[in-house]
């Protein structure tokens, strides 16, 4: 899990950036996702319904059994 991560389908979630090309966003982790055959899951709750800081996250999973579990969780979704 990477906290403070951009949620690609919901601009209401904020996220961290550490300079040019180092924003916690899908493009930043895409090489690792591709190389390690990971699946990404993001919050399914719309940011407008969140309270507090409204910071995004991503959960990265590789094992098929864990992917099935992630797909069954109502609070996470794949893009």
Image (spheres, rainbow, N blue to C red):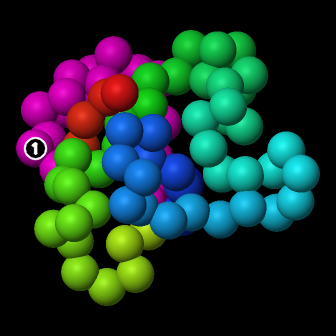
Q: Is residue 76 above or below residue 17?
A: above
- State which quadrant residue 57 falls in: bottom left
Give whichever of 30, 67 is nearer the camera: 30
Q: Is residue 35 left or right of residue 46?
A: right
Is 38 situated above or below 4?
A: above
Q: Position of residue 10 (x, y in %)?
A: 35, 48
Residue at the spot x=11%, y=32% of the render?
A: 72
Q: Give the x, y percent position of residue 28.
A: 72, 37
Membership of 58 in magenta stretch: yes
Q: Badge 1 is on which residue?
A: 74
Which image quarter: residue 64? Answer: top left
Q: Secondary structure at mark 1?
A: loop
Res 42 → quadrant: top left
Do we see residue 59 in this rendering? no
Figure check: 13 above or below 30: below
Q: Which residues are magenta?
A: 56-75
Report if residue 7 lies within the magenta region: no
| Mark 1 Cα shell of 10 Å, populated few (<14), some (14-19), many (≥20) | few
Q: Is residue 60 left or right of residue 12?
A: right
**Residue farthest along the bottom direction in this orientation:** 52
Residue 25 at least partly seen: yes
- Residue located 64% across and 14% down the image: 34
Q: Nearer the viewer, residue 18 or 63?
A: 18
Front position in the image: 3 or 10: 10
Residue 40 % position (x, y)? 44, 31
């Amino acid at each position: 899990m990477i906290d403070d991560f951009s949620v690609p389908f919901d601009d209401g979630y904020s996220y961290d950036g550490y300079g040019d090309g180092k924003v916690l966003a899908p493009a930043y982790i895409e090489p690792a996702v591709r190389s390690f055959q990971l699946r990404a899951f993001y919050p399914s709750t719309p940011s407008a319904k969140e309270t507090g800081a409204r910071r995004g996250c991503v959960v990265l999973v590789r094992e098929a059994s864990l992917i099935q579990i992630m797909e069954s969780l109502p609070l996470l979704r794949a893009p």
